[in-house]
Image (cartoon, rainbow, N blue to C red):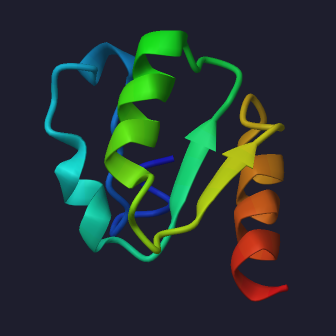
Amino acid sequence: MKELLPKAKFIYVDDINRDFNQLLSVDSVFVNDTVLNHGFSYKLMNVMENSNVPIYYLSNAVNRERSLKEIYEYIFE
């Protein structure tokens, strides 16, 4: 996905100790809900709860083409 969306920032579930505050400066947050765990979810929600950044959950994230379509629909429709 990085090669298709080179300007996107990616935070992986294994990066739970990473500073999520960088997400406060993005236009949108997209979450792959197929790999989401409670710790990551709580940390994300704590950082994002007072921001105006929309969070979108990708339900087809195991398929790259479907994920891109879903991202496009969230942004442009």
Q: Is residue 36 left or right of residue 70?
A: left
Give residue 6's quadrant in the image. bottom left
Give residue 24's quadrant in the image. bottom left
Question: Could you tell me residue 55's position as x and y percent?
Answer: 59, 57
Against 13, residue 11 (above or below) is: below
Which residue is rendered at x = 72% and y = 36% of the image? Answer: 61
Question: Could you tell me residue 13's position as x and y percent?
Answer: 40, 20
Towards the viewer: 10 or 2: 10
Which residue is rendered at x = 80% and y = 59% of the image? Answer: 70
Towards the viewer: 68 or 36: 36
Towards the viewer: 69 or 22: 22
Q: In this view, does 9 lie to the left or right of 2?
A: left
Question: Could you tell me residue 29's position as x and y percent?
Answer: 50, 58
Give residue 50's quadrant in the image. bottom left
Against 9, residue 45 (above or below) is: above
Against 12, residue 77 (above or below) is: below
Q: Is residue 73 left or right of residue 15?
A: right
Which residue is rendered at x = 33% and y = 69% of the image? Answer: 7
Q: In which quarter of the image is the C terminus?
A: bottom right
